[in-house]
């Protein structure tokens, strides 16, 4: 919640801003950060360490607790609190001066959570507050400078451009799974509520023994994060600033870590035992997200490695899809991902937006790597492929069935073509010159160039009925007697069972 104030007068003004929240039921207790009950004598008072407030209701009320994030340990104007005698109205009071022509802001995060214990509020706030910094506040830097309840250093700096962040898709997915993000300092991540700031020695290089790429030399300055063995025998993962991920044990060199000590003192580095290391998140730098030169795609293996590949213009990927065997140029593949459902195989998203299940052709695939060399992989080793400078998108296809094109998440399907059951979509146009429709005992053929849209009925009583929109605005509600619809797509004619068709949209170019 962002509140803005502007002094349009000619003289300074002192403002008293009252933010009032009311509740239909009386709360049971009020809590500061960490779950401590707020004292009420002589008045309702925040502790110096409180940057949030929790409004806790009795479980019998059936209400979620409400949490207000209003500050940071780094500093900022703190509110005074007032509460009504019936425990149903809570007031935040801020007082500050506003010079002539000046603007200032107050910003708050408001969350509703059903926590087993109020003391778990710190973990619930972690996606929004980490290391004393507000994460992804959504506020431009010029607004951040004028927020009175937070100092400017309480806002986490933006980490690179969106295009560069997309290059780090594998690292982003990993940090999202932790519920934590990299900051402007190195962090030893022990768990959701335990992080130790420090410094990794970045001079020199190490050598890794990987099962996919063999021996690989890695400059320490190119590391972005490390996932260690965590005392459970995991093979370490090494996330690089260029988007690649290596999986392997350290075969040469060592890692040295220094815990942050007294400011201005020289760091004291000690070796890290990778077998017990959980996660090391290294600070963001300007080099983050610079994809390897020449790379067009990232390829993730089933073992967790991410390779930067540089297939030639004539290189193709072969698979079996709904239209039979296909040989598709790499440039035509935007995303390819192993399916997590019980059905075997993968799902592909092509450049034209077509998305459907496939099975990669068995056998070895030889791929040139960015920077030289090549690698041979079997289809079973391929978990994911996506374009450089683009985020993997296929995860967004989970959820309810798509019944029309406007339900396809942006970037994960075509704007026109044929939509089938099972969230399959094919860019293209109807191949036949005309299409027959039936209304009761009447049959009519219509030129397919006049068909703007087809939409299957959502009524369970009329599942075979289609709404047909024609050029000129006419609408028909009819059945399609043909057992198959033929689509012209990617230079081929594909037949699809009519009983699997959900919708059709004519391409704009027609």
Image (cartoon, rainbow, N blue to C red):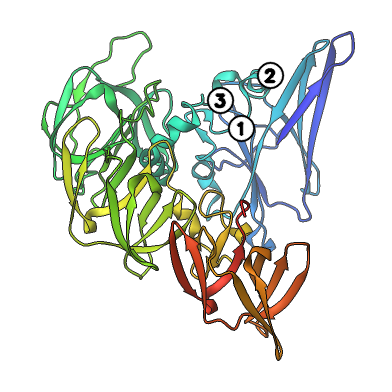
Give the foreground label among 1 and 3.
1
Residue that carries the numbered disc 3 in the rendered image: 155
**In-image side of 219 versus 507 (left or right):** left
Label placed on residue 146: 2
Helix, strand or loop under label 1: loop
Quick one: 378 or 230, which is closer to the camera?
378
Q: Earlier in the sequence, mark 2 or mark 3?
A: 2
Residue that carries the numbered disc 1 in the rendered image: 138
Q: Is the residue under label 2 in contact with that under label 1 (CB below 8 Å)?
A: no
Q: Locate residue 110, reporting x and y percent.
A: 66, 42
User: From the viewer's perspective, is residue 166 above or below residue 429?
Assistant: above
Label placed on residue 228: none
Q: Is residue 423 visible?
A: no
Sort mark 1 into few (<14), some (14-19) or many (20+) by Cα contacts within 10 Å. few
Rendered residue at 27%/14% (across/down): 267
Give the foreground label among 1 and 2.
1
Sort mark 3 into few (<14), some (14-19) or many (20+) by Cα contacts within 10 Å. many
Q: Locate residue 368, reporting x and y percent.
A: 21, 39
């Amino acid at each position: 919640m962002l509140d803005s104030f502007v002094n349009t007068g000619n003289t300074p003004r002192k403002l008293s801003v009252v933010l009032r929240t009311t509740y239909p039921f009386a709360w049971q207790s009020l809590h500061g950060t960490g779950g401590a009950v707020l004292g009420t004598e002589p008045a309702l008072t925040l502790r110096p360490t409180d940057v949030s407030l929790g409004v806790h209701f009795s479980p019998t009320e059936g209400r979620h607790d409400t949490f207000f994030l209003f500050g940071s340990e780094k500093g900022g104007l703190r509110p005074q609190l007032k509460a009504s005698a019936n425990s149903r109205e809570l007031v935040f009071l801020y007082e500050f001066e506003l010079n002539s022509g000046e603007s200032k802001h107050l910003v708050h995060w408001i969350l509703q959570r059903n926590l087993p214990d109020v003391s778990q509020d710190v973990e619930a706030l972690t996606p929004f507050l980490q290391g004393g910094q507000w994460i992804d506040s959504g506020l431009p830097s010029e607004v951040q400078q004028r927020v009175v309840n937070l100092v400017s250093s309480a806002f986490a700096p933006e980490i690179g451009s969106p295009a560069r962040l997309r290059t780090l898709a594998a690292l982003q997915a990993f940090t999202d799974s932790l519920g934590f993000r990299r900051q402007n300092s190195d962090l030893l991540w022990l768990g959701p509520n335990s992080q130790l700031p420090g410094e990794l020695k970045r001079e020199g290089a190490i050598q890794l023994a990987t099962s996919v790429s063999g021996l690989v030399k890695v400059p320490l300055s190119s590391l972005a994060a490390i996932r260690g063995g965590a005392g459970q025998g995991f093979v370490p993962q090494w996330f690089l600033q260029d988007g690649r991920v290596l999986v392997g044990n350290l075969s040469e060199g060592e890692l040295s870590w220094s815990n942050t000590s007294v400011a201005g003192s020289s760091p004291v580095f000690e070796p890290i035992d990778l077998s017990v290391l959980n996660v090391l998140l290294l600070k963001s730098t300007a080099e983050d997200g610079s994809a390897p030169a020449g790379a067009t795609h990232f390829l993730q293996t089933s073992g967790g490695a991410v390779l930067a590949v540089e297939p030639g213009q004539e290189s193709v990927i072969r698979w079996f899809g709904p239209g039979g065997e296909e040989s598709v140029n790499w440039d035509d593949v935007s995303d390819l991902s192993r399916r997590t459902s019980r059905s075997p195989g993968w799902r592909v998203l092509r450049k034209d937006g077509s998305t459907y299940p496939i099975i990669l052709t068995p056998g070895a695939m030889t791929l040139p790597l960015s920077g030289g060399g090549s690698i041979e992989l079997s289809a079973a080793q391929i978990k994911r492929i996506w374009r450089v400078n683009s985020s993997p998108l296929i995860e967004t296809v989970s959820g309810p069935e798509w019944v029309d094109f406007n339900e396809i998440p942006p970037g994960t399907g075509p704007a026109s073509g044929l939509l089938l059951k099972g969230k399959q979509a094919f860019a293209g146009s109807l191949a036949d010159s005309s299409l027959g429709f039936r209304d009761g005992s009447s049959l009519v053929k219509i030129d397919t160039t006049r068909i703007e849209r087809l939409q299957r009925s959502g009524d369970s009583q009329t599942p075979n009925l289609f709404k047909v929109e024609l050029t000129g605005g006419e609408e028909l509600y009819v059945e399609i007697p043909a057992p198959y619809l033929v689509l012209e797509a990617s230079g081929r004619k594909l037949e699809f069972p009519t009983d699997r068709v959900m919708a059709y949209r004519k391409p704009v170019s027609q």
